[in-house]
Image (tube, rainbow, N blue to C red):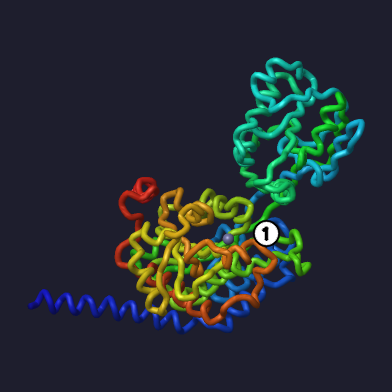
Amino acid sequence: MRKVLYLIVLLSCTMAFGQKDKKITEKTVSKASIQAHLKFMSSDALKGRDTPSPELDIAAEYLRTQLELYGVKPFAEFPDYFQPVSMKKIKKPQTGTITLDSATFTIGVDYLLISGGNLEWNGEIAFLDYATTEELEKADVKGKIVVANTGDGEEQSPRAWFAMSREKRANAKEAGALGLIELYNSPQIPWQLLVNYLSRDQVILDDGIEDERDEFAGIWLNNANREASPSFANTSKLDIKMAGAGVERFVSQNVVGYVEGTDPVLKKDYVTFSAHYDHVGVGRADSTGDDIYNGTRDNAVGTVTVLEAAKNLAMYPTKRSSLFVMFCGEEKGLLGSQWFVDHSPLPLSDIVFCFNSDNGGYNNTSMATVIGLDRTTAQGLLVTAIESYGLTAGDDANYKEQGLFDRSDNVSFAKKGIPAPSFGMGVDAFDEQVLRTYHQPSDEFDTIDMDYLYTFYRAYVFAGRSIGNMKETPFWVEGDKYYEVGKELYK
Ligand SMILES: [Zn+2]
C-alpha cells in the first residue's frame, strides 16, 4: 500500500515537473519572433549565407546580437560570442585551355580539373584506351600527357570511374607521365551536372597540418557521344595553359554562448543546442531566374531552434547548464562543428548531450523527425515532448540509406562519444516534395507552414528543457556504434 502510494506521489511529481517545463516553454516561444528570425535569416540580403562570404558574417552578427539580448553569456575565451574558425579555400584555375591542331577546349565548359593546379605545357600525348596498368607499361608515356577513356570499359558507374581515376593518375605518374586527360562519356551523370559539382572551389579547415595535395594534373574532358575522341586520336601534340589556382586563407566563425544551470551538482554538465547557420550561397539560377539559395529549411529553421531555446533557457535555466553553438561551414563538409569539438571552450566530457537541428525539407506536418531517436536514453523524453504537441515522433527508418545521421553536425559530437541526435521537421520519405526545395533557390521563407513551425519549435524547446532537467544523465543505448567511445569519454 505504502509502496503504491509512493509510486503515485513519484509519478505525479514527474508529471508535474514535465508540465512545468511545458508551461515554461509556452511562456517564451512565440510565433512572431520565430517568423521574424526566419525571415531575416532567409532574406535575399544574406545571399544564401555561403562560407566564406560577407553575408555569412552579417548573419553571425545578427545571431550574436540575439544571444546577447537574451542574456546568454559568452565564454571568457570568446568574449564576443565568436569562435574563430580557420579555413582555406583551394581555388581551381580561373582560366584554362587545352589546344590541339583541330580543337580548343575550355576549363569549366569542356573540361574539369580533378587534381593539380596551374600548368603551362606544350608537348606530346600518348593516346591509350583506358590507361590500365598493362597499357601504361607497354606504352612510352615518359614526359608525355596520357589521354584515355574514363573507367575500364566494364564498370558503368561514374562514381567508380572517379575512384579508378585516382589509381590511374598514381600509375601514370609512376610511369613518368606529366598528366592524365580522361575522356568522359556517360548518360548516368550528364556532363553539366559534373561541371556544377566539380568546378566549385573546395573549402577545408586550416588546422595547421599541411595537406599533401595531388599536384599531378588530372583532367576529365567532355566526350559526350564520343565527339572529342577523333581530335585526340588524330593529333600527337597538345598545349595546356591553366592559371589562377591557389590557396586563400580566411577565418569564419561559430557563434557560441552558454547559460549556467541551477543545480549545484548538475550545472557542471552541459546540454548543447546546435545548428549550422551557413548554406550554399548563390549558384545556378532556376527556371524563374532566381539564383539565391535562401536555405530557409536548410538551415535557417535549425538556427532559429537554437535562438528560441536560448531565449527560453536564459530566462528559465534548467538544472543542467546549456551550451548554444551555431556552426559555419556545414555545407562544406561539417567544418564548423568539427572545429568546435577540436577546440571546445569546455572539456568535452562536460558536454553530456548535443541536441542538434538540421533540416533538408519536410513533407509531413503531423510529425517531427529525430535522426538517431532510438539511439540514446533520451528517447522517452523526446517522444513525450513531441507527442504533447500533437505530433508523432519519427526517425529516418524509411530512408536509412541516405545516411543522414552521419551527414550533419551532430556526428562531429557523436564521434567524440557525445550522445547527439538531430531534430528536424517531419520527413516520412525522401521524396519529390523534399527534393523540390532541397538545396534549391526555392527554399524560401514564404513557402513555410508557420502554424506547423510554431508547434515544431515548442516541441523542440520542451524536449530540450526536459533533457536539461532529466534525472539520469542521457547516454547512448547499449550496443550503439558510439557507446564505447562514449564510455571512454565520460569514464
Ligand atoms: Zn543542413
Could you tell me residue 104's position as x and y percent?
88, 38
Could you tell me residue 9's position as x and y percent?
19, 79
Residue 89 in sight here: no
Inspect the image, locate mark 1, and give the three-letter code of the amino acid beneath it.
Val
**Residue 151 versus residue 29 in the image, above or below:** above
Q: Mark 1, residues whose alpha carbon is within 10 Å: few (<14), some, or many (≥20)?
A: many
Q: Which residue is mark 1?
A: 280
**Residue 78 versus residue 64 in the image, above or below:** above
View extreme (right): residue:
101
Looking at this view, is 327 or 170 the one in front? Answer: 170
How many marks the image carries: the answer is 1
Looking at this view, is 396 or 262 the one in front? Answer: 396
Does dot 1 land on a helix, a strand or a loop? loop
Q: Residue at x 75, y 22 (%)?
A: 177
Q: Residue at x 59, y 54 (%)?
A: 336
Left or right placement of residue 462 versus residue 205 in this view: left
View extreme (front): residue:
225
Quadrant of the rendered image holding ligand 1: bottom right
Left or right placement of residue 299 versus residue 136 in this view: left
Could you tell me residue 275's position as x and y percent?
55, 63
Could you tell me residue 466's position as x and y percent?
37, 71
Q: Residue at x 51, y 69 (%)?
A: 425
Residue 237 in sight here: yes
**Residue 478 versus residue 13 in the image, above or below:** above
Q: Residue at x 72, y 40 (%)?
A: 185
Q: Is mark 1 within 8 Å of ligand 1?
A: no
Residue 38 falls in which quadrant of the image?
bottom right
